[in-house]
Amino acid sequence: MEARFKGSFISPTLLIFFFFFFFQVAPSPVELSNVSSLRGELKGLFPSYDCPQCINRKEHGRISAARPDEKNIDILVTYTDANGAVRTRSINSKDLSTSWVWRYPSDEDGDHKKTSKEVEGKSEKPDKLEGTIDHSDGNKNQYGVVVEHKSASELHPIKLKRQRLRNERRERRTAELIEQDKEIENQIQDAAVERAKELDTTSKGKYNIWRKEYENPNSDSTLKLMRDQIIMARAYATIAKAKNEDSLYDSLINHSRESQLAIGEATSDSELQPSALDRAKDMGHVLAAAKDQLYDCMTLARKLRVMLQSAETGLNMLKKRSAFLIQLAAKTVPRPLHCLPLLLTTDFFIRRYEEREFPNKEKLEDPSLFHYAIFSDNVLATSVVVNSTILHAKEPEKHVFHIVTDKLNFPAMKMWFLVNPPAAATIHVENVDDFTWLNSTYCPVLRQLESARMIEYYFKAHQSNSLTSGTDNLKYRNPKYLSMLNHLRFYLPEVYPKLEKILFLDDDIVVQKDLTPLWSVNLQGMVNGAVETCKESFHRFDKYLNFSNPKISENFDPNACGWAFGMNVFDLKEWRRRNITGIYHYWQERNEDRTLWKLGTLPPGLITFYNLTHPLDRSWHVLGLGYDPALNKTEIQNGAVVHYNGNYKPWLNLAIAKYKAYWSRYVMFNNSYLQLCNIRE
């Protein structure tokens, strides 16, 4: 049996298969009920359109009466659903749309050209979607079913509009994302510019102490090579000695010495001797021979590890010695500074008694004037503080300097200012030993300094047990902690009972601006006006106090901001009202065993003036000139007071060279006493 329809065909064998499948494997009622839904799915998956071959089929007279009724043929269709799964359904030909075309083999030859022409008339390259997944032929599937798609121009206007809207939304979203990227990039650039403005370019000075080889890894290659060779030679020499390779051992030691001599004190390749390269080549040959004879990975690694540990131990020992020597050099009085008080003391006692007194005594207790307190045993340093303050004062005659020193330096201090009186200012020099009220009964610090435990801590430090326990805290063995001049700052109301406000100055500061406005600062009910020193987590209370002790942790905040002694405004009236000295005594007595804080005046100061300190503007007091070589130069120049806190005092050879000029400009080097003692710039 052969069925014929215009432009398509179904072979008799295929028809027999369809009939056999229909009668043998009949679909269930549930599947038959899904025919209508399958038809909808097929329409969605395989959209079909009316084709030219379907028009006027009766006019062509090509339908044969012998062919079967296409409406009663069952078709097995295989397709892929939306989830990607392969599905098979059986449908009847009557359920297909009229756009489906049947072809028969007998019509293939006769209608092929016509069909091609008709299709070309509609579209040069029509899109075709077969009714099965197996695309074995470009124009037909194994069942002879062909589906043709319309071109984009023939789509429904609503679909075209939706497609256009989707494209417009996609373009808008793309533009929005590009704009967001541009905004984020601009924000990043702006943030980078702001960070660059805040960058302190002078901080690069920190790294000037690095060796040149770190600046350029390709520089000084010969020098680094020779140093590495010496290290390897020492390692191989030890192994050779252990294996009784005496000749190799001697060769390694000799070449190591020669390379060390060739290097000498050189810090770069340009400083090496001309023969250095030849020495490096000779050493290379010896090391190659040693490697051939002695190389063992584990043995060599073990030896290098031992050498590294030995070098670390030696380095730690040198660090401790260096710290001790720096402390010793910082606290030892140089010969010129020792000479100066001797000459001044001699001349003081040569003077008549009436020539040893200062004028303007009536100003010493006048609260309307500007009063300063300086407690020091260093004549030269005190002179710089007074000179720099007076030179920048707008009304020098209103400034009064109260200087307190010890018994040993009292004549020298007094003689200096008798011979070199500051212009129009008032000077008053006192001896701390004349304060009879300052005794061990009243003052806990004096009582503690006289205890056997404190004497052992300071004067028996050479003993092994004491030295070992105090090696890491050498700075706390500073002799200044034995002097009451260092603790006198907590007794200002007792020292100056008639004054209402006073400005405390350390002897290692330099004044660069008029300090008169400090007396007008509103302390807002606080006792102490000081510059805070905390930056992020640095110099907060937990750096100075032992917060593992409940007495500290229960009364103070470890994150409270620290502040600096050295330039402080004290409201003495508020001090007396709040009994600040009593607070100081209370905590000092509880620290007799030094478990709350180590020795010094800043920790008890932080405790005593806790929540009683008013922060001043940072430009009033610039710190760090005695230990930090990377301070901001502009900040130093704009500071009203610069402070050489630390070991590198400006009157010592240890001083940081670039900071020394700020101090030396106020030293009277043409003074006869300084010249006799050989004190020069």
Image (cartoon, rainbow, N blue to C red):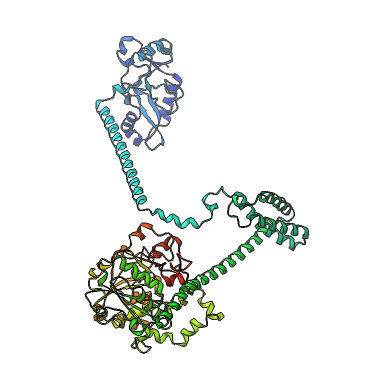
Which residue is nearer to you in this view: 1 or 339?
339
Q: Residue furthest bottom?
A: 441
Q: Is residue 256 visible?
A: yes
Q: Quadrant of residue 465?
A: bottom right
236 sits to left or right of 210: right
Task: Identify the image quadrant of the N terminus.
Answer: top left
Vertical arrangement, residue 610 with respect to residue 155, above or below: below
Q: Is residue 419 left or right of residue 311?
A: left
Residue 389: give x, y in percent of width and height: 32, 68
Q: Quadrant of the C terminus?
A: bottom left
The residue lying toward the viewer, choosing from 375 and 359, is: 359
In the picture, residue 86 is in which quadrant? top left
User: In the drawing, does residue 214 fall left or right of residue 151?
Assistant: right
In the rendered image, residue 179, in percent from the top left (x then y), is placed at 30, 39
Residue 238 pos. (x, y %):
71, 62
- Number of on-image labels: 0
The residue sitting at 32% across, 34% down in the picture is 33
Does residue 334 appear in the picture of this structure? no
Q: Residue at x 68, y 50 (%)?
A: 275
Image spot of residue 242 (x, y percent) = 74, 63
Between 668 and 239, the residue placed more toward the observer is: 668
